[in-house]
Amino acid sequence: MIRPCEEREFEQIWEIVNDGAQAYRGVIPADRCAEPYMSEDELHGQIEEGVVFWGYEEGSRLLAVMGMQRVKDATLIRHAYVRSGEQQRGIGSHLLTHLRSMTSGPVLIGTWEAAAWAIRFYERHGFTRVSQQEKDRLLRTYWSVPERQIETSVVLADWRDGRIDGRSDNPNFSGA
């Protein structure tokens, strides 16, 4: 079952994020991989900034989380993690499909450039990688991340036949 996460599930969300993020160890630059990957304070900050977490539950156990955040004229998919023992079962696909069905307009996802499996996952779901120049602009416009993270990340987009912030890498869009 896919459902909004509840405030009382904060510990479970935090646990899933940090467990799922173990896949990045040894892949992304060491200076971007803290222990824990995301602190409780960082997660609280993300929620305070408007990230709404949705969960995938089987029985009474939360197996995965994915956040959604509306920023300006786009929706960001944030912090998509599946418990390490539950990966490769299609859970992430179910969550992403569900969240996309709730949005209209452009959807953006940022991930680590070195996380090839994550990039392939989003591309299989219809997202396209934006140009380097557009990536830098989008990360500075829609996210609050350090410069080093901008250097080591990519942005993928589902333009939904639209544009954001007056511009677009959408090949189907012609305009200013």
Image: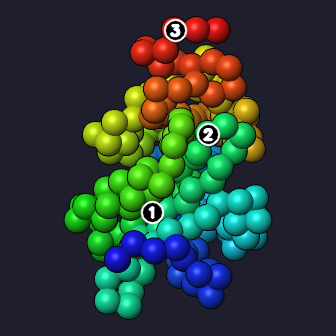
What label does residue 174 carry, if any? Answer: 3
Circles 2 and 3: CB distance less than 8 Å?
A: no
Tell me what residue is drawn at x 51 percent, y 49 percent.
103
Residue 139 percent location from the top left of the image: 66, 34
Circles 2 and 1: CB distance less than 8 Å?
A: no
Q: Secondary structure under badge 3?
A: loop
Out of 2 and 41, give the one closest to the viewer. 2
Tell me what residue is drawn at x 47 percent, y 19 percent.
170
What label does residue 81 carry, if any? Answer: 1
The quarter in which the C terminus is drawn is top right
User: Which callout, 3 or 1, points at the residue further toward the start of the chain?
Assistant: 1
Question: Taking the image as drawn, is residue 24 in sight?
Answer: no
Circles 3 and 1: CB distance less than 8 Å?
A: no
**CA gap, disc 3 and disc 1:** 35 Å
Q: Is residue 151 left or right of residue 169?
A: right
Within 10 angstroms of label 1, few (less than 14), some, or many (20 or more) residues? many
**CA gap, disc 2 and disc 1:** 21 Å
User: Which callout, 2 or 1, points at the residue further toward the start of the chain?
Assistant: 2
Tell me what residue is drawn at x 32 percent, y 42 percent.
125
The quarter in which the N terminus is drawn is bottom left
Residue 54 percent location from the top left of the image: 50, 68
Tell me the residue that label 2 is attached to: 74
User: Which callout, 2 or 3, points at the residue further toward the start of the chain?
Assistant: 2
Marks counted in the figure total: 3
Residue 111 percent location from the top left of the image: 51, 43
Q: Work out which residue is located at the far left of the displayed protein and give it.
A: 89
What label does residue 67 carry, if any? Answer: none
Please, is residue 136 above or below residue 79 in the view?
Answer: above
**CA gap, disc 2 and disc 3:** 19 Å
Tell me what residue is drawn at x 41 percent, y 52 percent.
101
Q: Amino acid at mark 1?
A: Tyr
Location of residue 115 (image quadrant): top left
